[in-house]
Image: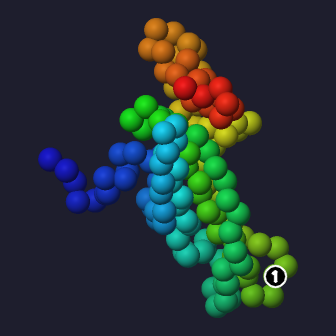
Amino acid sequence: MPSNNGSVLDVFFPATTSQYFKVISWSQDENNVCITLEEKDQPPQTQVGKKVLSKGFHDITITDFPIRGKRALLTFRRRYWQVEGQKELLKRDIQLAFPGTQLEKEFADFLKADGGRSSGLAGFYRRVSAPPSQRI
């Protein structure tokens, strides 16, 4: 039986995504499902009494497990904040991509373990991630 503590999106997105992000748009074409998520305006804890202002976004796009045979591209709009009286900007330390890749961590771990074996997912990923002129 489904739990009331989470969302159906928790099944499809990387861990803790719904805690920090909300879906703002999505689209699809014959090869891709593109989902854009925006970080909620909930700044990290700072010094008590200091005003914190949102200062814009930085977009990060990663590839996740395929959805219905299409490449899943997740664009995370990462929010930056500025604490009153400080020059440096704040951001949450949320690990979205596997270090050195543009792949979601669990997906990168899966592909590494699969290594092109009989599941065929690594081969499928290589086909759908090819340049547009060479895609399936």
Q: What residue type is labelled 1?
A: Gln
Side of 83 where 88 appears, left or right: right
Q: Which residue is label 1 attached to? A: 86
Q: Where is residue 68 in the image (x, y as percent from the top left)?
A: 39, 35
Q: Residue at x 58, y 40 (%)?
A: 63
Q: Where is residue 31 in the image (x, y as percent from the top left)?
A: 52, 37
Q: Which residue is drawn at 48% across and 15% down?
A: 120
Q: Is mark 1 on a helix, strand or loop?
A: loop
Residue furthest front in the image? 133
Side of 57 where 36 appears, left or right: left
Q: Which colour scheme is used?
A: rainbow
The quarter of the picture where the C terminus appears is top right
Residue furthest top in the image? 118
Q: Position of residue 34 (x, y in %)?
A: 52, 50
Q: Residue at x 47, y 57 (%)?
A: 26
Residue furthest left in the image? 1
Side of 90 where 135 appears, left or right: left
Q: Please say if 56 is above or below 132.
A: below
Label count reads: 1
Mark yes or no: residue 1 visible.
yes
- Between 28 and 45, the one lying in front of the other is 28
Mark yes or no: residue 47 visible.
no
Q: Residue at x 48, y 54 (%)?
A: 27
Image quarter for residue 125?
top right
Image quarter for residue 45?
bottom right
Q: Residues within 10 Å of mark 1 (few under 14, many from 20)?
A: few
Side of 102 where 6 appears, left or right: left
Q: Position of residue 114 (x, y in %)?
A: 52, 17
